Each structure stands twice: as structure tokens, then as C-alpha cells.
Image: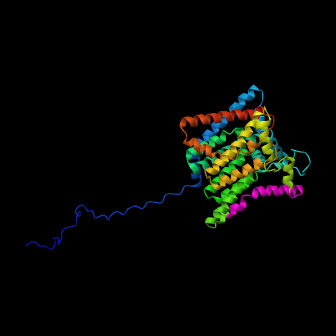
Amino acid sequence: MPSTASRPTSAPPRNAQSGLVPRAPKTPKTRRPPRKATPAARVRAHLHRAAPALLAYAAVRVTGLLALAVWAHRRHHGVWPILATHWDADWYLGIADHGYTHHLGTAYDANNLAFFPLYPVLVKAAAALTPGTRATTGWAIAIACSFLAAWGIHSVGSHLHGHRAGVLLTVLWAALPVGLVEWMGYTESLFTAFAAWSLYGVLTGRWLWAGSLAALSGLTRPTGIAVAAAVTVAALVSLRNGFSARALAAAALAPAGWLAYVGWVGLRLGRWDGYFAVQRLWHNEWDGGVETVRRLREVLGADSTPELFLVMVTVTLLASVALYVLSAWDRQPLPLLVFTGVLLLIVLGSGGVYFPRARFLLPGFPLLLPAALYLARASPRFRALSLTAAVLGSAYCSAYMALVWPSAP
């Protein structure tokens, strides 16, 4: 009888003949959390979104530059001195070369302490590291800063109202009647860049960024106090929603640049009102708008043949007031209203010279938001016609300002 000792007492496990063993059930793979974008990647993405606005800005400014070059060629006039060495550019280059005066003096329109220091300091520092003259360096800085300003303007507009509004806001700023100044050796481009990015910092809650840029704007132009006011007011109002050390620091930091330069001038001249004494020698005293109203009446009524450039300045001032009313009606964010409101008070309330006031309002880009929003909702045909007219009008007015108008822009 065959033995059964070798027989299996139970059925062999499945797959035993092939030598396979049962596999453990698969566990689901855990997904790794997405990597945070680096600051450089975020900047590249932000710049990519702004690329259409920057290209449009460049197209507008190149159009204006070509119009100036053609007109200057017909008048046998050089373009380079207009862009880099005339009027205020000459003052800034003189400060970069020789520094500031130590005395108040009595001569009118002759004291360089009226010009704030950051731009000539940048020109001097960059010229020491790059080939070419200081005039070339100053012009290059102005152009580079104009693109930074355009980027910041697009960022503010697109943050508030979307990409199309941001692009239109940038194009309208480029097509202002005195837009040529953005590519001259002046401080408007640098100042507008600080103002735009400081306001963007406030709108996005980056308080230290906003306060630091506001302080730098206060070292660039006298109207830097308008940027400081916007940041400080917005920061203090935000404290109603809870204490924030960053907001409080921004409120204190924002006016520091302006106060530092005004205080330094006072120490240099040995009198507490030194800076304001210098401004009086430049006829820039506060009169509450008396001189502005007088010149408006003169241009619009008393003078039967007013100078075209003065008409353009007058229209710009009146349009700016109207746009501010519309901005308030649209309930723009508080920092934008404070910035443009203080800027208008300074420009319209000054008893100084009348003709550069359109240029003084150039950094007030939030005033253009109502127009940008209207064009964003308009038909494509109307939008194209309006922008074409604005660009061609800007090219003509800018060339006229530089070649026909006998004084500074």
C-alpha cells in the first residue's frame, strides 16, 4: 500500500508551481506638495504678464521720438541736447559733477539746492562704472526707469481692474502731451517708478516695500511728499483692522526721504527754513492757487492769441481736476486718491512758474484710470481711434514743446 506521508494535506497555494508568492496590495503614492516659486520665477512671471503693456509703451515712445527727430532734422536742430543736456538735465548734471552749493545767495532761479539728490547721485555712481559721459548715463537711467514706471503702472491697473485696463492705463500714460519728458534726462521717470511700485505695494499689503519706495521718492522730487502721504494715510487706516508692526513702520518710513533732504538743506544753509528759502528764490511759494487761477484766466480769456504750449498746459490742468472728480466718484482706493489729491494741491496751489505744470503732473497716472476703464468697455474701433489720436497728439505736442516752445518743458 502506498504511503500517504508524502501527500499534501491541503491544496497548494495558488501560483506555487510557478514559484510566485502573493504580492502585497499597492499603497497609493503620496503626491509631493508643489514647490514654491522662487522670487526670480515670480518676477519673470509678473514681467511676462506685463510684456504687452511694455511693448505698447515702447511703441508709443518710439513714435514720439521719431516725430521729434524728423521735425528737428527739418529745423537743423540736434536731438541729443534736447534729450540729455538741456534745462533741468543740465542742473542735475552740474550737481553730479560739482555737488551742491553752500550758500543761499540772492539770485533768482540759480540755487541748485532746489533739486533733490537721488537722480544725480545715481548718474554719478553709474557713470563711474560705465563708459560714456554722464549725460549719456543720465539719459539711459531715465529710459530704464520709464520702463520700470510703465511696468508698475500696468501692475496697479491690472491689479485693480484686469489686464486690459492695465495695458490701456500704461498706453495713456505714455501718450500724455508731455510724454517726451519720460525719455529725457529728468527725474519724472524715476519718480513715477517709485510712486507706482510704492502704491502697488500698498494695494497688495507689502508695507515695508511701500514705505521704502516712498522714502526714495522723497529723495527724488519735492512731490515725493504726495507718495509719502498716500502710504502713511493708508497704513494708519489699516491699523483699524488690527495692529501691524509692518504697517506702522511703513507709516514712519514713508516721509523719511523727503524730511531728510529738507532737513539737510536747512543744516547746510544754517537756517531751519533753508529749503523753503531756496524755493522762494525759484518763485515756488504756496499761494493757495491764486497764481494758477490768474494764469488760467489769462490763457483762456485775456490773451487773444495764447501760446499753443500754454494752452496745452491749461487743458492738462483742467482735465486733471475733472479726472480727479471722476476718480473720487468711482471710489478709487484711498492711497491712489491721497496721492493724486496731494499732487494736485501742490501743483495747483503753487505760485511758481506756470508752464512746467503739465510735467509736474506726469507722475499722477491714477488720474488716467477713469479714461482707461471707459476705453476698456468701448468698442474696438472707438478704442483704436482714440488711442491713435492720443499717440499722434502726444508726438506732435512733445516735439512742439522741445523745438518751438522757448523755455523748459
Location of residue 21 (image quadrant): bottom left
| Residue at the (69%, 42%) spot, across then down | 319
Q: Looking at this rendering, what residue extends furthest in the front direction?
A: 301
**Residue 18 versus residue 321: which sits nearer the camera?**
321
Residue 156 percent coordinates (x, y): 61, 50
Residue 12 showing in the rendered view: yes
Q: Is residue 213 above or below residue 81?
A: below
Query: Tag count in the figure?
Result: 0
Location of residue 389 (image quadrant): top right
| Residue at the (66%, 40%) spot, across then down | 174
Q: Tell me the quarter of the image containing the C terminus.
A: top right
Location of residue 29 (image quadrant): bottom left
Residue 292 percent coordinates (x, y): 78, 44
Q: Tell me the quarter of the image containing the N terminus.
A: bottom left
Residue 296 percent coordinates (x, y): 77, 41
- Which residues are the magenta region? 248-272
Examine the residues drawn in magenta and state their main secondary structure: helix
Q: Is 228 left, or right, of 161 in this rendering?
A: right
Residue 384 percent coordinates (x, y): 58, 35
Residue 144 showing in the rendered view: no
